[in-house]
């Protein structure tokens, strides 16, 4: 079995660098306890099962459990309007319940995107109070609460605040006393400041396929993230979903394991958890992504199987591989790998390769250039494997360039559309100006230079705006649609991405 497991994590085995922990328990016994790579590359400190990782959004299940415990104790009612507990943080008219926070049914605009629009970079220190102030300024939601599912981190920031208001304790302290200590999770805590010393810390790293760089972790938010832990401790917590001791089975099922009905679309999200089947086997799982860290925990309750993976780098899709590990243990047929072979050609038109490529399905985009016979993705060179096939170092990132250009990234194949900008200079000049949004207090300018339209910010620099149609442009996984007054003059733009819809900036000049 271990040979198959190591093959799944071949990148970590063959290319020593950052890596991760893998822990598998089956029917109450540890059957796989494996560590790969370095917790600290610079000092060659290996990862062990004692190494502590930032687990990112896996933190949400702890916050959901806290809400479930307080509900069971009668200290809150999960169907109350959130204004009952945090009236000062709600600036919109729609009623929204605590249960809708738990299930991501509120329509809150995600604060990561709002911070970016406000001018914060990924390297800035962000405090919990910064987020609360930003959330409180939201005057409009993406949709009517309860109407549909949208994963949004502000929900869980507000849930942690409710725990603090009701208990009178800081959330990190409450979680330590009521969640971690009772379960013997001695290496788990909620980090509320990025300067906190963490014994046995596994440092986070980015991997471009050729070299590692430090991933900056400057966030201080919790509720939606912030928990530091080990696979060993997370496994203890996930056992609560089979044999609950912190709350009753009834409360567990009602709040954390029941997927709600929605009016539009579908959802698999319950209380800080996703509920799905894998080849006929019921699963309960969640993952996390932040600053180079990757985490995943999945429980197969009917098989009494738990797989947990923590990584301190972003070069493997741990959620996909966690399921692959489960397939090996349970004897399921292996996942059919995605391949680019059907798109391979023996020749390639080098002159046609450079350009800006876009995936209509998920918004991923790639800026491809050629210099001195080398193809680059951004500033990173691609290895030419012959014909039209290129690969980015040790990463599972492949490109096949041609009439049907495709990219295989991690575990899927994406068809890419090459932008052919046909920008009307008259339209571009109409859009030029300075734009302001009061909710995030963000200022952006639109400039026209060298025949191109640019979206500009003092902190973020210049990004080319690629014309789509009409008054609509694409820039950095978002669409910018310019709006006009009754006289047809551009007076605003609307920003929309996956988690922030129709967020409007008014033209100042």
Image: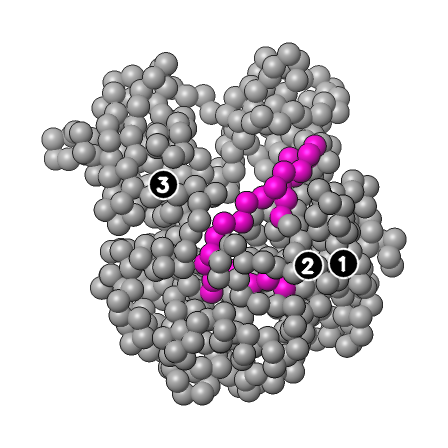
How far across and down, in percent of the image, does residue 389 sit? Answer: 70, 26
Answer with mark 1 or mark 3, whichever residue precedes in sequence: 1
The relative height of residue 415 versus residue 99 in the rendered view (above or below) is: above
How far across and down, in percent of the image, does residue 86 sit? Answer: 31, 71
Answer with mark 2 or mark 1, whichever residue precedes in sequence: 1
Near-viewer residue (388 or 476): 476
Labels 1 & 3 near each other (Cβ < 8 A): no
Disc 2 marks which residue? 200
Residue 208 drawn in magenta = yes
Q: Residue at x 44, y 49 (%)?
A: 125
How far across and down, in percent of the image, does residue 420 sit? Answer: 45, 21
Crowd tier of the residue under label 1, counting other residues whose Cα lies within 10 Å: few below 14, some 14–19, many 20 or above: many
Compared across the picture, whether 137 is left or right of 27 comes to: left
Crowd tier of the residue under label 3, counting other residues whose Cα lies within 10 Å: few below 14, some 14–19, many 20 or above: some
Q: Residue at x 40, y 73 (%)?
A: 164
Crowd tier of the residue under label 2, counting other residues whose Cα lies within 10 Å: few below 14, some 14–19, many 20 or above: some
Residue 164 drawn in magenta = no
Q: CA distance from mark 2 to mark 3?
A: 34 Å
How far across and down, in percent of the image, does residue 132 sit? Answer: 34, 60
Magenta stretch, main secondary structure, is loop
Near-viewer residue (470 or 306): 306
Compared across the picture, whether 48 is left or right of 212 comes to: right
Labels 2 & 1 near each other (Cβ < 8 A): yes
Q: Circle 3 sits in a helix, a strand or a loop, which is it?
A: loop
Near-viewer residue (467 or 89): 89
Q: Quadrant of the N terminus?
A: bottom right
Q: Which mark is residue 119?
A: 3
Q: Is residue 287 visible?
A: no
**For residue 134, which quarter of the picture?**
bottom left
Near-viewer residue (447 or 469): 447
Q: Which mark is residue 48?
A: 1
């Amino acid at each position: 079995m271990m040979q198959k497991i190591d093959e799944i994590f071949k990148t970590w085995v063959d290319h020593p660098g950052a890596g991760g922990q893998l822990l598998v328990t089956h029917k109450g016994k540890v059957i796989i306890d494996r560590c790969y790579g370095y917790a600290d590359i610079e000092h060659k400190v290996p990862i062990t099962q004692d190494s502590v990782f930032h687990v990112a959004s896996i933190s949400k299940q702890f916050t959901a459990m806290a809400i479930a415990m307080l509900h069971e104790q009668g200290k809150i009612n999960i169907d109350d309007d959130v204004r009952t507990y945090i009236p000062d943080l709600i600036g919109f008219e729609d009623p929204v319940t605590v249960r809708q926070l738990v299930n991501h049914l509120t329509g809150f605009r995600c604060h990561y995107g709002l911070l970016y629009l406000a001018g914060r970079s990924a390297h800035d220190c962000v405090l919990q109070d910064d987020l609360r102030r930003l959330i409180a300024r939201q005057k409009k939601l993406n949709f009517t609460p309860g109407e549909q599912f949208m994963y949004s981190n502000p929900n869980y920031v507000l849930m942690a605040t409710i725990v603090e208001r009701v208990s009178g304790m800081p959330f990190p302290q409450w979680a330590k006393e009521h969640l971690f200590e009772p379960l013997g999770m001695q290496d788990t805590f909620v980090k509320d400041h990025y300067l906190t010393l963490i014994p046995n810390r596994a440092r986070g790293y980015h991997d471009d396929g050729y070299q590692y760089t430090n991933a900056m972790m400057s966030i201080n938010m919790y509720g939606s993230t912030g928990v530091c832990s080990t696979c060993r401790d997370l496994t203890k917590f996930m056992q609560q979903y089979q044999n609950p001791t912190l709350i009753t089975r009834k409360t567990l099922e009602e709040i954390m394991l029941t997927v709600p009905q929605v009016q539009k679309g579908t959802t698999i999200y319950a209380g800080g958890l996703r509920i799905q089947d894998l080849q006929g086997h019921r699963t309960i799982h969640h993952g996390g992504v932040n600053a180079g860290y990757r985490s995943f925990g999945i429980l197969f309750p009917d098989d009494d199987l738990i797989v947990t993976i923590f990584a301190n780098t972003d070069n493997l899709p741990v959620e996909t591989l966690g399921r692959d590990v489960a397939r090996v243990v349970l004897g399921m047929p292996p996942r059919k790998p995605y391949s680019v072979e059907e798109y391979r050609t023996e020749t390639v038109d080098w002159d046609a390769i450079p350009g800006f490529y876009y995936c209509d399905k998920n918004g991923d985009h790639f800026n491809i250039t050629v210099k001195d016979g080398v193809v680059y993705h951004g500033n990173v060179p691609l290895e030419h494997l012959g014909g039209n096939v290129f690969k980015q170092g040790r990463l599972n990132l492949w490109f096949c360039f041609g009439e049907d250009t495709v990219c295989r990234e991690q575990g899927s194949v994406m068809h890419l559309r090459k932008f052919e900008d046909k920008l009307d200079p008259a339209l571009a000049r109409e859009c030029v100006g300075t734009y302001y949004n009061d909710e995030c207090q963000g200022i952006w300018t639109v400039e026209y230079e060298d025949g191109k339209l640019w979206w500009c910010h003092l902190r973020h620099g210049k990004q080319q705006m690629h014309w789509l149609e009409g008054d609509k442009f694409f820039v950095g996984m978002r669409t910018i649609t310019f709006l006009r007054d009754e006289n047809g003059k551009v007076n605003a733009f609307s920003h929309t991405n996956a988690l922030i819809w129709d967020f409007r900036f008014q033209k100042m000049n």
